[in-house]
Amino acid sequence: MTQEPIPFPVRINRYLALKGIATRRAADDLISAGRVRINGKRATLGDRVEHGDVVDVAGKRQDRSKPLIYLAYYKPRGVVTHSPTPGQRSIADAEGIPRGVSPMGRLDKESEGLIILTNDGRVTERLLHPRFEHEKEYVVQVREKVSPMYKKIFEGGVVCDGEKLTAKEVSIDGPHMMTVILTEGKKHQIRRMCAAAHLTVDRLKRVRVMDVRLGPLGSGKVRALEGRTLKKFLADLGLPENEK
């Protein structure tokens, strides 16, 4: 496929998307995490790239002197994933998380559950780009009573703000509980789908990303991905474990 010409000057997130490095949303995550530089200076959201600028994305070439780290973290409710405002708690403030790792994707402030953290820049595009259709599983508690018809509604897709949002699979687990599996990963997708279906979300918890499960991990805690879990995670992303 021919790469789309870059219309300089261009916003940095669009530049990274046009270069095939990351989706715009994933690019925003990289920028917020301080992993993008323009002409040697740390990029910020909204920066523009001019023709001839040198853009560097940390992780495109792995530093062999630094070990690659992969973590599963239980983001508590009330903690923001990226770009906290004064007074907000962020993942970067959490105990036990080493410097240099970044969250892969987002959970909004009022949601909780599994976030993958890593310093492996190869993971971002492979995990977050919608073309790869990686599963993410959520447990959703709503205020209203849910019936089997919501499975059909969500799997068939709902339209919100002119955009069709679809769940890959839904199971009704109780009068007020659903399990929802997504592959699209659109912003606030489950909350928007529930709102379109006149459901009020009381609790939203992500319990799985691909084959990595939250399991018994406690809120605010972190564990290393290693052994078979790590090998399968990287293999499913098409990333050899020893590739640097």
Image (tube, rainbow, N blue to C red):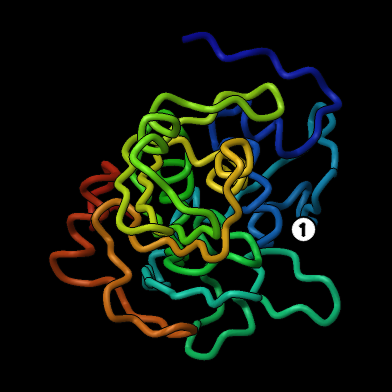
Left or right for 121, reference 229:
right
Q: Helix, strand, or loop for circle 1? A: strand
Q: Residue furthest top?
A: 2
Residue at screen point 65% across, 75% down: 78
**10 Å crowding of disc 1: few (<14), some (14-19), many (20+):** some
Determine which quarter of the picture holds residue 215. Answer: bottom left
The residue tagged 1 is 42
Determine which quarter of the picture holds residue 131. Answer: top left
Q: Nearer the viewer, residue 159 or 107?
A: 159
Residue 27: image x %, image y %? 63, 44
Give the residue type at disc 1. Answer: Arg
Image: 214 above or below 129: below
Q: Residue furthest left?
A: 228
Residue 241: image x %, image y %? 23, 57
Residue at screen point 35% across, 55% down: 209
Residue at screen point 79% across, 30% down: 52
Image: 102 above or below 243: below
Residue 20: image x %, image y %? 54, 29
Q: Please indicate, yes or no, whether residue 183 appears anywhere in the rendered image.
A: yes
**Quarter of the image that includes the C terminus:** bottom left
